Image (cartoon, rainbow, N blue to C red):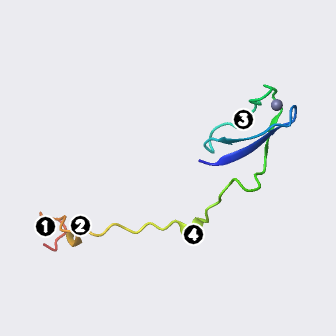
Amino acid sequence: MPLYDYKCDACATRFEVNHPMAAPPVRVCPECGEHKVRKILSTGGIQIRSSGSRQSAPPPPACATGGCAGGMCGMG
Ligand SMILES: [Zn+2]
C-alpha cells in the first residue's frame, strides 16, 4: 500500500497516510480538523519498485510434477 505525505496548511502538521491508490486523498487534518490538507511529495518514504523486477516463473507443466495421472496431457 502506498505511503502518502500530507501537510496541513493550517497548523503545519505533517503526517503520513497509508491508503490504496484508488482511495480518495485525505482532506481533513487529524490535528486541527481543518480542510487545508494537501498532498506533498515524499522525500524518502515511498519506495518505488522498478517495473522490471516483477518476474513470475511459469508453473511447471503438470506432467513434469506427476500431476497428470490421468494422461490428460497426452504424454502419459
Ligand atoms: Zn492542521
Give the distance between the C-alpha atoms of the residues marked 3 and 2, in whole angstroms.
48 Å
For the point 57% across and 69% down, the residue is 52
Question: The residue tagged with tag 3: helix, strand or loop?
Answer: loop
Location of mark 2 (residue): 62
Percent position of residue 72, x then y: 16, 65
Q: Earlier in the sequence, mark 2 or mark 1?
A: 2
Quadrant in the rendering for residue 7: top right
Q: Alpha-carbon neighbours of circle 3 within 10 Å: few (<14), some, or many (≥20)?
A: some
Location of mark 4 (residue): 52
Q: Nearer the viewer, residue 38 or 71?
A: 38
Q: Nearer the viewer, mark 4 or mark 1?
A: 4
Q: Alpha-carbon neighbours of circle 4 within 10 Å: few (<14), some, or many (≥20)?
A: few
For the point 17% across and 65% down, the residue is 68
Label pair 4/1, CB-CB below 8 angstroms? no
Indicate which disc residue 26 carries. 3
Which amino acid is tagged 2?
Answer: Ala
Give the distance between the C-alpha atoms of the residues marked 4 and 1, in whole angstroms.
37 Å
Location of mark 1 (residue): 71
Which amino acid is tagged 4?
Answer: Gly
Question: The residue tagged with tag 4: helix, strand or loop?
Answer: helix
Quadrant in the rendering for residue 8: top right
Quadrant in the rendering for residue 64: bottom left
Which amino acid is tagged 3?
Answer: Val
Q: Nearer the viewer, mark 3 or mark 2?
A: 3
Q: Is residue 33 above or below residue 73?
A: above
Q: Earlier in the sequence, mark 4 or mark 1?
A: 4
